[in-house]
Every structure is written in C-alpha cells, then in structure tokens.
Amino acid sequence: MSTYNNPRILLIDSYDSFSYNLAALCRKSIPNCTVHIIKNDQFAWNDLLPKLHYFSAVIVGPGPGSPLLERDIGSVRCMWHLEDSSLLPVFGVCLGLQSLAVEYGAILKRLHVVKHGQISRIQHEGAEIFKGLGEIDAVRYHSLHVELRPEGDVEALAWADDGDDENGRVVMGIKHKVKPFWAVQYHPESVMTGAGGTEVLSNFWRLAKNWLISHDRTSQDWDFHADKFFGLPWPRPRPSVVACPAPGRVHTATLWLPHATLPDICEMLGVQDERSPFVLLDSAAQPGRFSIIGCLHTSTPRITYFLGDTYVSVTQGKHTSRLELLGHDIWTWLASFMRERKAQGGRKELPFWGGLIGYLSYELGVDSLDVPLRDDREQARHPDANLVFVDRSVIVDSATGNMFVQSLLPEDYTWMTSTIRTLKGHRRDSANSSKPSQPLSAVEVTIPDRNLYTTRINQAKEYLRSGDSYELCLTAQTKVKVQTSQGSSSRGSSSWELYKSLRANNPAPYAAYLRLHPSTLVCSSPERFLSFSRPPRSVYQLRPIKGTLRKGPGITRAVAERALRGSTKEVAENLMIVDLIRHDLHGVVGDDVDVPQFCVVEEYETVWQLVSVIEGSSSNVELDEGELGWEALKRSMPPGSMTGAPKKRSVEILQSLEDNERSIYSGVCGYWCVSGAGDWSVVIRSCFKYDDSSDPSSTEEWTIGAGGAITDLSDPEGEWDEMVLKLQSTLGAFNIKTR
C-alpha cells in the first residue's frame, strides 16, 4: 500500500541550485510522498541499482553541463537503461530530459539564443503529463536542447516556438514510447512557472501509479539497510533545543536627542581613536531605521578565524587564546558560543540587544560549498570570520530620535549612567563636527584592465552557452593608495573620515563601519542578504537585488519601471537568483518558503532597485530558531546574487576568471543577537584595508570590489560601464573620478 498511498520518491541532484525547490514541488504535487535526495555521483551504479526497489518513482533533476559528459551526468544515464525487473517510473527535468533523449538517439545541440531565466509559452496537445492543462507559461534555464529522431524510442509531447529568427521550435516535453519515462525541458519548480509545475508533476504521479499497478510493482518496505544507505528524507528532522544556561537579562535606558546625528554620536563614543576597535551598523538611508553602535571595552571578546586553521582566536584586551575546534567547523563553534549567551528582557521594538557583530568572508561561503579554494591562495591577511561579542550598545532610532543604551552585564549601572551623561552632553552647535573633512588624497589608483575584463565577460558567456552556468557574477578589484598624516594615532581616524565621506556621497540602508584590526571595512551596501526575526515563529527573509538604475533628471518611477521591470535581462537575472535563494532556504526550513514580492522597483536614496523578497518559516516550535537562522546563513553563503547559478559550478568557474580572492568583498556583515534574531547584508559598495602594525608608513592601501551579473544577453562594453558605475559609488569617497 505504501507504494501508491505513501510513495517514496528518489530525487537525483546533479549539483543544481534548484533541487530543493523541485523536492518541495514533489511534496506538494504527490500526496503523502517522502522524498530522498542523492547526488548523481554519490553512489556507484552497481550499489544504487539494487536499492531502487525501495522507491515508487525517481525524479532526475536539472544541473549544469552536458548529458554527454560523465562528470556532469553521473549515474543518471544508467537510469534510462533499467532492465524490466528493476524498471520504475522516472521523471526528468532539463538536464534530465536531455539525458533521456540522447540515450535514445536524439542529437544534442546548442540554442542559437540562450534561454536563461526567461518565460516561454509551452505548446502541447493535452496528452500524458499535460492532460487537462490549458496554456502554460514556464521558465527555461538552458543553452542546450535536443533534436529527436522520428525513428527513435522517444517522442515529443510539448514545444516552445522561439521564432525563426531565434531557435525555431524547441522540444519542451517528451516521453519514452514504451518505458514509464517522461521529462520536461523547462523548470516546473521555478517560482514563475504556473500550471506547468504542480499539475504536470501530479499528472506524472497519476501515470506512474497506473503503471505500477498495471505491472504489479510494489516498493520494498523501508528498513535498516535503506536507512543506513540513503539517510534521512528531505526535509530532514532538526534536533530539539539544546539545554543551555539560564538566559541573561538585557538592561535598557532611553533618551531623546533628536538633533544629534549618528556621526556625532559615534564621535562622542570614541570612534576617532584609530587604535581601538569600533563597530557600527548604520541605517544611513531608507528603508533602514535603526543603527547599532557597539560600545567595546577591554573585556570584549574578539573572535577571529582563518580557513584551514584548527582553532579560533579569542582576544580580550592584550590576551589572546587559541581554542581548538576539535573537529567542528567555525559555524558550529559560533553556534555553541552563542548558545551560552542567550538573553531576554530587551525592548521588543529594538532589533538588537547585544550579540555578535562583524563580517564573514566570501571564501567562508566557498568553503561551505566544498569548493577548493584557489590554488595560488596566499596566506590570507584578513580573517575569514572577524566578530566581536557586543555586551554594551547604543541603538539609534532615526524615525523618532530616540536612543537606547543597553547592557548585558549585570549591575552595569555606572557605565549606563556615564554613557547617558556623555550623550546628553551633545550640543546642537557641534553638528558641524560630524561633517567629513577633506577627502583622503589618493597617491595611486589601480583599476581593472578594461580589455581583460571584457575578455573575461566573453569567456563567461561561453560557459553560459555550454550549459555550465545560467548566470555568472564577475567581479574585479581596484586598489587605492592614500596618504594620511594621521596614520593610526589617537588624534584621528582616516578610515572614519573615509566612512563619513562615503556615507554622505552614497547613503545606504545597510551601511557599516567595522574597525576590527587587522581589518577595517567601510561599507554602504543597499542589499540585505538574510534576516531572521526573534523567536518564536521566526521568519527568515532574503532580499536579493538584481537591477539598478541611478537617479537623475527625468528618471521618474515610471521610467525606472520601464527600464527595470520592462527589461528581459534584468528580470531574468533577478528570477535566477530568486529561484536559487528559494532552494537555499528550502534546504533549511523545509516546505514553507514563499515569494511575497517579485521584481518590485524600490526607491533608494540615489538609485532605483529591482528587489525581490523570499521568506521562509519553520512550523517545528521545538527547534532553536535562532540557530536555524544561523544555519540558513551558512547554507545560503556565499550570496547567490554575487555568484550566479547553479552556485557551486558558478563559483568554480569564477575562480578561474578572477585574479584574486574576494576576501571581505562579496561576503556578509551584520549581527546575530542574543535574542535569536539576526540581520546580515551583502558587502558591496565597500572598501577595506589591512592594518600592518609593524609598518609605520603613512600610506594606506584600500581594496574595492565591483562587478556585475553576466548573462548571455550581456554586452561586454555595457557590463564594463556598469562595473565602473558601481565602482564610482565608492571611489567618490576618495574624491576620485573614473571618467
């Protein structure tokens, strides 16, 4: 009975970034099903074959590459040649369709015009998996397609008409003439695929069930051997809340200083002392509201970690301890660290009560994908995790002018009273002190080579056309050397002056000033990466930006709508990242993922942005939701908007196209609160420097990363201009013009 009423589905993942979306679609379309996911090369075929009897059907998912290459297709090609005794229904998607077709004589070809993240009308005759369906608009992610042979064992069920000036009529659905195999070329799991998703999977299961019944096939009962071989189904059960010490208390005092600017407040709290660490998460523009200032002291724990090390360094004052990871990764270690420091009793309207603030590098995300780091990787100068545990903080509410002085330390009234007195000492006529001084004077600027960058754009497009990626976010680094007479003296901070200049020129809702020696980050990011709300019933939200139009005379909302929402290229870029992020979030929270906002034009201080919103939640109230948010951060890095899709293959390709590690750029910065909430932004529109305490030179070198998403529709010269435009938003803080 379980074969038909509680079926088990095996989903074969070819290292795609949409596989969990497909698993969620299966659970929605096939009643009471259980889904197990394996990689296409996870098991040798001779080991996998006898285990297929545990399943009612197989889904062969999409993936990068070609069905003709063993490294891309793995064991999938064997699935299409099952003997009668092992035969069971199979449904293929994209690469799965191509594999089925070529195994039965079809010719694999390249499309003349690549279709990545584009929506097409699917023509069909209402038969088989398309029975009862009307018009279908479906999302396509492919540069390869198949041409069926009339004498072959596979026949077409659906097509897309791309027109004679593009690809002509392209096969979109097929079936084997005898065996229970069906497949579609488009992506039924995409958020913008309508009836061609749920209804087609439901039809597949109807056909599969009829075939199983007519052939008297039942699946083998799940037992210890299957459990050991395949592991847990998706979504995997999560451990219950781990016992931890009684939570601490948050102590809060409120004052109202409507005339004090945020730079004023930071300067009153000591930001100009370059020798001391300082952290600021700054809502410098709408839609931001709250800004967070960490009030660090000699006992504040500083946590640094370099990839490859077996230990974490924790510094308090002048003392540094090396704490062994003991076989755990840095993510697990930090989760344990925060588990011991939970707190309650803070103001509910405040996003942050205390906790970790800092940055996590791009390479930390690369490592989480099990992608080897660059072969020429030098000893990293910037830590891959650089965080402080903030137990004293000041929160500024830009909407009301209220400030909140907070402490996690017991009986910390002396510090709170002293801080309030300092803040109340602000004089209205001191506001001019917060204005940026003369911009730093550049002595040398090295921007990317234009010809090399455009050459690599063309190389990236070749990878897109060969099917290895749908979108590649190509970046390059600019180096700026500046002269500073202040250096690291206590009289002033060159990096703070730079931040004030950047803040004035390019205000952003997710700005940050992080001075965590040896690294200093100056950031004016417009893009929130991941936020997770305070438990219980946490909501996990990601807000990818793909599509930017700078404001200017005549650039009204209507103009921005036409330029962004009306652009096939911009919408396709955004859609690809939305589907990728849905996959990342599904992998953590399970089924409950939604897209409440798709490609909406939002107004920011200096630009119009095309923004989507992806949200997820977990219905399991026994979970530690704060740690689930932390896992969502781990599983979602590096940010998909900075890699492309499929993520793993795209990251591998980018490492061959870029000359340097990205380091802090393209990573994330933000906080994880002791309440269980968190908020992390993408490190873009930023620059960072390395502080060498042994070098007394008054010259600083800053690194700026910039780039853009490359699709097959990209014009190399246009992409160069876009990269320079993004670069200029940061170079302007140095008073540098690129043209």
Image (cartoon, helix red, strand yellow):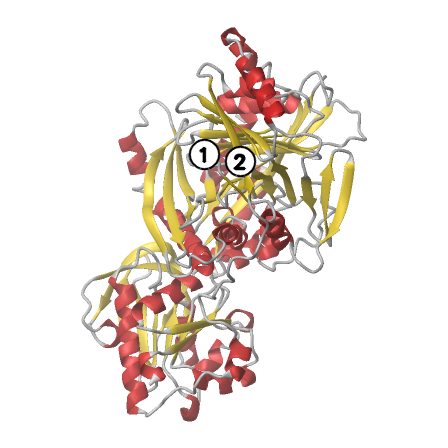
Q: Can you give x and y, in whole percent of width and height, for residue 318 in the image?
A: 78, 34
Q: Amino acid at mark 1?
A: Arg
The reply to whether residue 429 is in sight is: yes
Q: Quadrant of residue 544?
A: top left
Image-based side of 211 in relation to 452, left or right: left
Q: Can you give x and y, in whole percent of width and height, for residue 317 in the image?
A: 74, 33
Image-based side of 286 in relation to 638, left or right: left
Marks 1 and 2: in contact by CB < 8 Å? Answer: yes
Q: Who's the residue at 43% across and 21% down the image? A: 401
Q: Return the residue at label 2.
A: 250
Q: Who's the residue at 32% across and 82% down the image? A: 4
Q: Identify whether 240 is placed above or below 707.
A: below
Q: Who's the residue at 56% across and 54% down the image? A: 651
Front-lying residue, 642 or 238: 238
Q: Can you give x and y, in whole percent of width and height, for residue 627 in the image?
A: 52, 52
For marks 2 and 1 on the same chain, the one whose residue lies earlier in the sequence: 2
> Helix or strand or loop: what does disc 2 sit on?
loop
Front-lying residue, 538 or 70: 538
Q: Identify whether 419 is placed above or below 533.
A: above
Q: Quadrant of residue 41?
A: bottom right
Q: Amino acid at mark 2?
A: Val
Q: Quadrant of residue 686?
A: top right
The reply to whether residue 150 is in sight is: no
Image-based side of 370 in relation to 707, left or right: right
Crowding at mark 1 (Cα within 10 Å: few <14, some 14-19, many 20+): some
Q: Who's the residue at 30% across and 86% down the image? A: 211
Q: Return the residue at label 1.
A: 347
